Amino acid sequence: MIQRLAKNKLELIHTMAHEIWPICFKEMISQEQIKYMLEWMYNLKQLQQNFDKGHEFIVLREQEENIGFASFEIRNEKSCVRLHKLYVNPKRHHKGSGRKLLAYIYGVGRKQKLNALDLFVNRTNPAVNFYQKIGFEIVESIDLDIGNGYFMNDYRMKIKI
């Protein structure tokens, strides 16, 4: 079951990110960068600010277990849904959980009559293959200075809705 979260439930996103990120990113970026990025993007104040800017947060739950989460926003000026976050517990990878979260977001975009869904993903993340397999295309490569000597080396990927 996919559940939309209210602003007062964003602590769950904070908790899940701190459980998932150290496992998923350990081969891609340093532990120091993981810690920095978690504090930067997943502190409760930042999550609440994102919520206030129109980001929606969803959680996939199965048998009372939190499996994964995502956040996205409608970008009407670009006729696009921007996927900001999509993370699944590594124990549940390759079981359709990521597809379920994406299908929900894709459906939101269709209802709003938007043209595309886009996202940013680390260029060395195995999720790049997942996204390509389901039809996303690499649009551009971006190196973003996020401070403290760290960079996000990402692809922007896009799929038509």
Image (cartoon, rainbow, N blue to C red):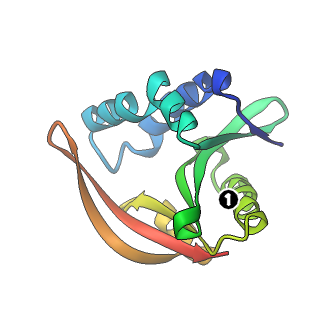
**Is 40 rendered above or below residue 152?**
above
Image coordinates for residue 42, horizontal then vertical, percent: 45, 31
Image coordinates for residue 121, horizontal then vertical, percent: 43, 59
Q: In which quarter of the image is residue 32?
A: top left
Q: Nearer the viewer, residue 128 or 83?
A: 83
Q: In this view, does 99 lie to the left or right of 89?
A: right
Where is mark 1, residue-wise? Answer: 102
**Is 66 rendered above or below residue 117?**
above
Q: How crowded is mark 1: few (under 14 residues within 10 Å), some or many (20 or more)?
A: some
Q: Is residue 78 left or right of residue 66?
A: left
Determine if residue 123 is in view: no
Image coordinates for residue 10, horizontal then vertical, percent: 61, 27
Determine if residue 11 is in view: yes
Secondary structure of the residue carrying numbered label 1: helix
Q: Which residue is drawn at 61% across and 41% down?
A: 89
Q: In which quarter of the image is residue 91?
A: top right
Q: Which residue is drawn at 41% across and 77% down?
A: 139
**Is 110 rendered above or below residue 4?**
below
Q: Quadrant of residue 65?
A: top right
Kind of residue at badge 1: Leu
